[in-house]
C-alpha cells in the first residue's frame, strides 16, 4: 500500500493520485483497466477453475475415439507374405520361393514389418496408460491451480495486513514526540540503597503529576477493570473512537499520552480501544489528528 | 429589493438537491431583500401530481405562491420523447414537446412571473431543464437569473437550452466544472456568471460520541450520506467496499445514512441507519473518519461540503468531474476510478494520520473560504449590483428566436447524447486551460 509523507502544509492531491497510480502500476506490472483484468481473470477461471473445463471422462473419450479412428493392428510373420487360403496357390508359391529369392531378399522387409507390428501392439497397450497419466495430471494441475490461487490470496491478504500494521505503527510513532528529559535514561542496576533515594523522589514526583492529571481512580479501575466510557472518557484515552478523550490521547502502540505528549507505561493503557487494538492516528474532539 | 425564486417544487419537507438549494437561497436572501417563492402544487418529482393547495403559503417565514400543474407526467410518453431527442436527429418542436412531457407544466406560473416582472428586481430560476425555467427565461429574460444545477446528462445537449443560457441576465453556477460544461455546450461566455454553490447550516457543535451511543456504532467508520441508489454509484461502492473489507478484515466500517431503493449487502461491516434528522446526520459525519461520495453525476455535493465543514476528508468518485475538481481544488479529498484506486485511497485516508489531518483541515478552510453563508450571500448581492449597473447603462441582450413554424419542425438538431459526448469532461484545476475561469470566479 502507498505511503505518503505529509511534511508540508501544502497537499497536492493530484500528486498523491499520481503516486497511487504509479504504485498500482508497479504492483501490477502493466496498467490494465478494470475490465481487462476481469477478462483475464475469467479466462483463467475458465481454463483452470471451471469444473466444466476439466474432462473427467478423458479416458473414455479417448478409447471411444481410438476405436473409431485407428485401423486394427495385424501380426506379421515370415510366412505372412506368401499366405493364401487356396491350397494349390500356396503350393506353387512355396515351390517358387527359391526362384523369387534369386531376384530379391524379402527377409529384411518381413523382419521390419514384424517389428512394426510388435511396436504397434506395444503402443496400443501403452496409450491408455499415457492418457491415464495425462488425465491425472490435469486433475492435479487444476487442484494445484486452485491451491495456488488460494495461497496467493492469502499471501496478498497477509502482506496487506502486515503493510497496514507497519504503516499504522509508523504513523503512530510519528505522532508521539518524546519530551527530552521526560523519561530518564536507563540506569544500570546499582543495588546500593543510597543511590535509590534521589531517583525515588523524582519518580514519586512524576507519579504524583500523573495522578493529578488522571485524577483518582476508582477501586475497580485500580484492580484492572475497564476505564469506563462516557464521562470517564474525558480523562481516559478514547482516541481510537475519534471523538472523545478530551484530555487524553492515544499514543503510539496504544499508550495513553498526557497532554504534554509524555508517554506513559503501556501497562496503564485504557481498554477503550477498538477491536483493531490501535487507531491510525489520534483525533481530538474536533476530529483533528493530534500532531505533537 | 424585490426578488422572486421560481422552482419546480418547494417545501420544508422536500430535500431534493435543487429544491433544497432554492429554499436555502430564498431564506438567506430574505435577510437582504423581499423574497417571494413561486412554485407549483406538486410534491412528487416523478408524477408532478398537484398535492399542495393552490395559493399563497408561508414556509419558514417566506411567502410561497403555488400554481397548479396542468398535467401529470406520463413516464412512457416521457421515455419515448427522451429517446427521440437524446438518441435521434430531431427538431426544435420535438425538444419543446419533450420539455412539456417532462413537466411540471404550469402556464399559470409563467403568466404570473410575466405579470409581476415589472414589480420585481430579479427572478431566480432554478433548474434549467424544467418547464418553468425555460419558459420563464424566455418570457422575462430581462429579470431572469438562472441557477442551472446542471449535471452531465444529455439534456444539456438540447438546442433549446442554448438560447436560454445566452439570453438570461446572469448564471449562478454551482461549480467550475458545471460552468465549463455549460459554456462548452451553449457558448454563453458573454453572459455574466459566477461560481457560487451553496452553503449549509452547519451546527456550531457536533457530538460524535452521542451518535455512537445512540446507534451503537463503536468502530471507526467511513460514511455515505444520501439516497442509496444504483444511480448514485452505490452498487459500485458496495462492490468495492466488500473487496476492501476482505483485504483488510480490521479496517474501517461503512455507515450508510439515507433511504435505500436498492438492496444493501448483508455484511457485518456495513451498517444502514436509514434516514436521520439533521442533528444525527451532522453528528454522524463528525464521528466518521471520512465521507465517501460514489456518485457519477453531481452538480454540487452538499454533503461533501458538509463533511469538509466538519473537517472530514472526502473520498469521491473520480469519474464525476465536479467532485474530482473539488477534491483537487480544495486539497481536501482523494478520488478513485477503479477498485485498486479505491483501496489505495481509502487505505491512505484510514492509515495515514498526517494526510488525513491535512486534508481535513484543508476541507474546513475550503468551506470557510468559499461556502459559508456570508460568502454565498455576498456573491448573489454582488451579482445583483452588477446587473443593476448594467440596467442603468441600458445594455440588453435580445431573446433568440427559435424560428417560425416550419423552421421548428425541421429535423436539424443532432441527438443530445451525441452533443454531450463532444463536450469535454475534465475537472477544472489550477494550472489547466480553464484556470482563468477559476481566477475570474474567485
Image (cartoon, grey):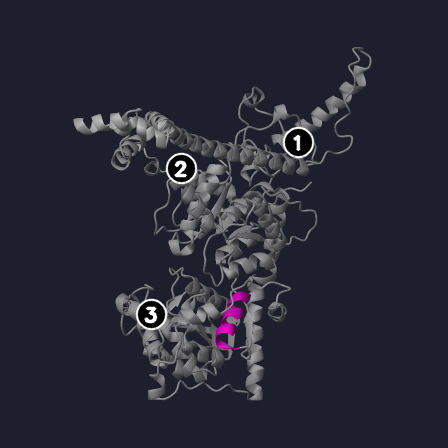
Whether marks 3 and 2 lie on the same chain: no
For image coordinates 67% across by 45% down, the residue present is: A5
Q: Looking at the rendering, which quadrant does residue A227 occupy?
A: top right
Is B406 situated left or right of A291 in this image? Answer: left
Give the SS element for disc 3.
helix
Whether marks 1 and 3 lie on the same chain: no
Whether marks 1 and 2 lie on the same chain: yes
- Earlier sequence position, callout 1 versus callout 2: 2
Quarter the C terminus of chain B occupies: bottom right
Q: Which of B212/A99 is in front?
A: A99
> Would you call the spot at circle 2 few (<14 residues within 10 Å), some (14-19), or many (20 or more)?
many
Q: In this rendering, does residue B355 appear at all?
A: yes
Q: Looking at the rendering, which quadrant does residue A203 occupy?
A: top right
Q: Which mark is residue A213?
A: 1
Q: Is residue A154 above or below residue B285?
A: above
Is B226 situated left or right of A63 in this image? Answer: right
For image coordinates 61% across by 34% down, the residue present is: A166
Q: Is residue B368 above or below residue A183?
A: below
> Would you call the spot at circle 1 few (<14 residues within 10 Å), some (14-19), or many (20 or more)?
some
Q: Chain of mark 3?
A: B
Q: Separation of disc 1 and disc 3 at Cα?
A: 68 Å
Residue pointed to by mark 3: B82
Q: Find out whether residue B299 is within the magenta segment.
A: no
User: Looking at the picture, how far across and down is residue B260, in whole percent?
Assistant: 36, 50
Q: Residue furthest top?
A: A192
Q: Find out whether residue B179 is within the magenta segment.
A: yes
Q: In this rendering, does residue B175 appear at all?
A: no
Which is closer to the viewer, label 3 or label 2?
Answer: 2
Give the SS element for disc 2.
helix
Residue pointed to by mark 2: A48
User: Looking at the picture, how far across and down is residue B368, in whole percent?
Assistant: 60, 58
Q: Is residue B68 above or below residue B238?
A: below
Amino acid at each position: 500500500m502507498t505511503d505518503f509523507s505529509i511534511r508540508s502544509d501544502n497537499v497536492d492531491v493530484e500528486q498523491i493520485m499520481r503516486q497511487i497510480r504509479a504504485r498500482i502500476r508497479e504492483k501490477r506490472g502493466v496498467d490494465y483497466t478494470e475490465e481487462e483484468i476481469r477478462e483475464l481473470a475469467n479466462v483463467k477461471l475458465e481454463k483452470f477453475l471451471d469444473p466444466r473445463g476439466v474432462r473427467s471422462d478423458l479416458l473414455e473419450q479417448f478409447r471411444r475415439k481410438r476405436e473409431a479412428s485407428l485401423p486394427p493392428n495385424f501380426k506379421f510373420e515370415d510366412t505372412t507374405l506368401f499366405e493364401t487360403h487356396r491350397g494349390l496357390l500356396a503350393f506353387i508359391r512355396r515351390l517358387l520361393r527359391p526362384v523369387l529369392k534369386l531376384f530379391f531378399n524379402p527377409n529384411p522387409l518381413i523382419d521390419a514389418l514384424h517389428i512394426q507390428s510388435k511396436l504397434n501392439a506395444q503402443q496400443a497397450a501403452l496409450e491408455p496408460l499415457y492418457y491415464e497419466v495425462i488425465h491425472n495430471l490435469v486433475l492435479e494441475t487444476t487442484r494445484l491451480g486452485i491451491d495456488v490461487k488460494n495461497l496467493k490470496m492469502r499471501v496478498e491478504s497477509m502482506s496487506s495486513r502486515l503493510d497496514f500494521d507497519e504503516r499504522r505503527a509508523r504513523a503512530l510513532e510519528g505522532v508521539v514526540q518524546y519530551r527530552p528529559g521526560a523519561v530518564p535514561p536507563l540506569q544500570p542496576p546499582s543495588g546500593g540503597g543510597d543511590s535509590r533515594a534521589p531517583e525515588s523522589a523524582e519518580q514519586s514526583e512524576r507519579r504524583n503529576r500523573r495522578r493529578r492529571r488522571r485524577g483518582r481512580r476508582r477501586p475497580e479501575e485500580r484492580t484492572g477493570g475497564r476505564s469506563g466510557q462516557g464521562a470517564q472518557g474525558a480523562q481516559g484515552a478514547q482516541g481510537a473512537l475519534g471523538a472523545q478523550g478530551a484530555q487524553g490521547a492515544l499514543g503510539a502502540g496504544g499508550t495513553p499520552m498526557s497532554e504534554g505528549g509524555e508517554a506513559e507505561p503501556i501497562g496503564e493503557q485504557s481498554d477503550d480501544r477498538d477491536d483493531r487494538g490501535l487507531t491510525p492516528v489520534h483525533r481530538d474532539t474536533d476530529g483533528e489528528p493530534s500532531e505533537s | 429589493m424585490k426578488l422572486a425564486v421560481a422552482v419546480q417544487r418547494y417545501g420544508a419537507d422536500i430535500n431534493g438537491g435543487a429544491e433544497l438549494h432554492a429554499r436555502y437561497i430564498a431564506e438567506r436572501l430574505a435577510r437582504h431583500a423581499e423574497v417571494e417563492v413561486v412554485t407549483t402544487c406538486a410534491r412528487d418529482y416523478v408524477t408532478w401530481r398537484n398535492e399542495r393547495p393552490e395559493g399563497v403559503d408561508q414556509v419558514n417565514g417566506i411567502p410561497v405562491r403555488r400554481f397548479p400543474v396542468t398535467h401529470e407526467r406520463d413516464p412512457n410518453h416521457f421515455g419515448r420523447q427522451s429517446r427521440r431527442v437524446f438518441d435521434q436527429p430531431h427538431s426544435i418542436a420535438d425538444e419543446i414537446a419533450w420539455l412539456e412531457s417532462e413537466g411540471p407544466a404550469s402556464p399559470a406560473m409563467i403568466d404570473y412571473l410575466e405579470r409581476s416582472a415589472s414589480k420585481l428586481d430579479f427572478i431566480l430560476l432554478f433548474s434549467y431543464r424544467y418547464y418553468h425555467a425555460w419558459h420563464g427565461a424566455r418570457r422575462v429574460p430581462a429579470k431572469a437569473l438562472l441557477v442551472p444545477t446542471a449535471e452531465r446528462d444529455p439534456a444539456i445537449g438540447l438546442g433549446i437550452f442554448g438560447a436560454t443560457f445566452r439570453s438570461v441576465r446572469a448564471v449562478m453556477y454551482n461549480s467550475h466544472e458545471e460552468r465549463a460544461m455549460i459554456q462548452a455546450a451553449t457558448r454563453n461566455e458573454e453572459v455574466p456568471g459566477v461560481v457560487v454553490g451553496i452553503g449549509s447550516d452547519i451546527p456550531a457543535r457536533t457530538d460524535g460520541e452521542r451518535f455512537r451511543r445512540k446507534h451503537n456504532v463503536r468502530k471507526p467508520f467511513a460514511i455515505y450520506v444520501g439516497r442509496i441508489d444504483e444511480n448514485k454509484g452505490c452498487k459500485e461502492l458496495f462492490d468495492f467496499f466488500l473487496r476492501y473489507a476482505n483485504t483488510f478484515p480490521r479496517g474501517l466500517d461503512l455507515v450508510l445514512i439515507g433511504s435505500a431503493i436498492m438492496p444493501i449487502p448483508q455484511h457485518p461491516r456495513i451498517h444502514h441507519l436509514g434516514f436521520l434528522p439533521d442533528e444525527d446526520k451532522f453528528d454522524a459525519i463528525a464521528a466518521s473518519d471520512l465521507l465517501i461520495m460514489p456518485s457519477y453525476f453531481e452538480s454540487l455535493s452538499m454533503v461533501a461540503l458538509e463533511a469538509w465543514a466538519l473537517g472530514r476528508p472526502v473520498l469521491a468518485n473520480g469519474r464525476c468531474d465536479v467532485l474530482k475538481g473539488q477534491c483537487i481544488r480544495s486539497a481536501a479529498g482523494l478520488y478513485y476510478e477503479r477498485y485498486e484506486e479505491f483501496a489505495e485511497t481509502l487505505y491512505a485516508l484510514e492509515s495515514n494520520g498526517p494526510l488525513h489531518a491535512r486534508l481535513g483541515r484543508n476541507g474546513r478552510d475550503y468551506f470557510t473560504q468559499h461556502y459559508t453563508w456570508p460568502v454565498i450571500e455576498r456573491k448573489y448581492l454582488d451579482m445583483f449590483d452588477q446587473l443593476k449597473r448594467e440596467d442603468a447603462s441600458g445594455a440588453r441582450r435580445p431573446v433568440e428566436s427559435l424560428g417560425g413554424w416550419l423552421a421548428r419542425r425541421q429535423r436539424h438538431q443532432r441527438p443530445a447524447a451525441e452533443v454531450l459526448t463532444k463536450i469535454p469532461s475534465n475537472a477544472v484545476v489550477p494550472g489547466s486551460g480553464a484556470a482563468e475561469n477559476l481566477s475570474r470566479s474567485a
